[in-house]
Image (tube, rainbow, N blue to C red):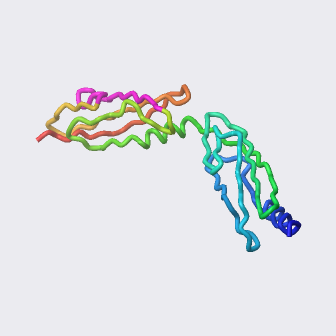
Amino acid sequence: NKNNDSKILNELLESISIPTETDKDLVLPTSYEYKGKIITALWKTEDTKYISTDGTIYRDYEDNFVSLCLTLVLNESQITKYFDITILAKKPEEVANNIFDSIDILDTISDNIQLPSVVRYNNNSYKVNWESSDPSIISSLGEITYVDYDRNCVLTAAISVNKQIYSRDYNIKVSAFN
């Protein structure tokens, strides 16, 4: 019965809520089970640069307004609703911290280490500049000088994110050479 199907679709549509702003991926089901019926859900958007039809969001350095269209289909009946969402900007310091967190450096070394000069993050490449607090122990290229007793040194990584410079210190102990 088409009237009953339309009523079910209207009820289901009223129960679906999508946040008006987000910095997290959305869950966009391809079907709903409602009142014993399986209802197809079709999601569409023109704003695929910022959100995909599976709910994956792509954040930029500024807030972006997107429109998401949901069409529910049951037998011969269908109903459509638009949801307006603001995809919240990613903060440069958040990006920088995620990049630094991805750099894996041992805190105790006894041999040269490979310091990444470029780090890939979210389909972008970021140049990493290294500086040593004591180049006589470990150079900014990760080359150590063999020492006869354990020595501490700080390696500082610096990156530019959205024209802002961020840095993080890595405390390194160079073990004595036996």
- 15 vs 130, left or right, is right
Image point 73% across, 45% down: which residue?
85
The quadrant of the rendering that contains the N terminus is bottom right
* Of 22 and 150, the residue lying toward us: 22
Highlighted range, magenta: 125-141
- Tell me the residue at 88%/66% (across/down): 3
Question: Farthest residue in the right direction?
Answer: 3
Residue at position x 23%, y 27% in the image? 136
Residue 15 appears left or right of 90: right
- Pinpoint residue 132: horizontal percent, then vertical percent: 32, 29
Judge whether residue 126 is colored magenta: yes
Quarter assignment of residue 113: top left
The extreme bottom residue here reads 36
When asked about the image quadrant of residue 149, the answer is: top left
Q: Quadrant of residue 156?
A: top left
| Front in this rendered view, residue 12 or 60 | 12
Most distant residue in the left direction: 178
In this rendering, would 131 be left or right of 60?
A: left
Q: Position of residue 5 (x, y in %)?
A: 83, 66
Query: Which quadrant of the rendered structure holds the C terminus?
Result: top left
- The location of residue 123, given as percent across then percent down, is 50, 36
x and y percentages locating residue 53 in the rendered image = 65, 48
Q: Where 1 sits versus 108, above or below?
A: below
Examine the structure image and report whether residue 6 is included in the region drawn in magenta: no
Q: Nearer the viewer, residue 177 or 73?
A: 73
Count the numbered circles shown.
0
Q: Nearer the viewer, residue 151 or 74?
A: 74
Q: Is residue 139 above or below residue 174?
A: above
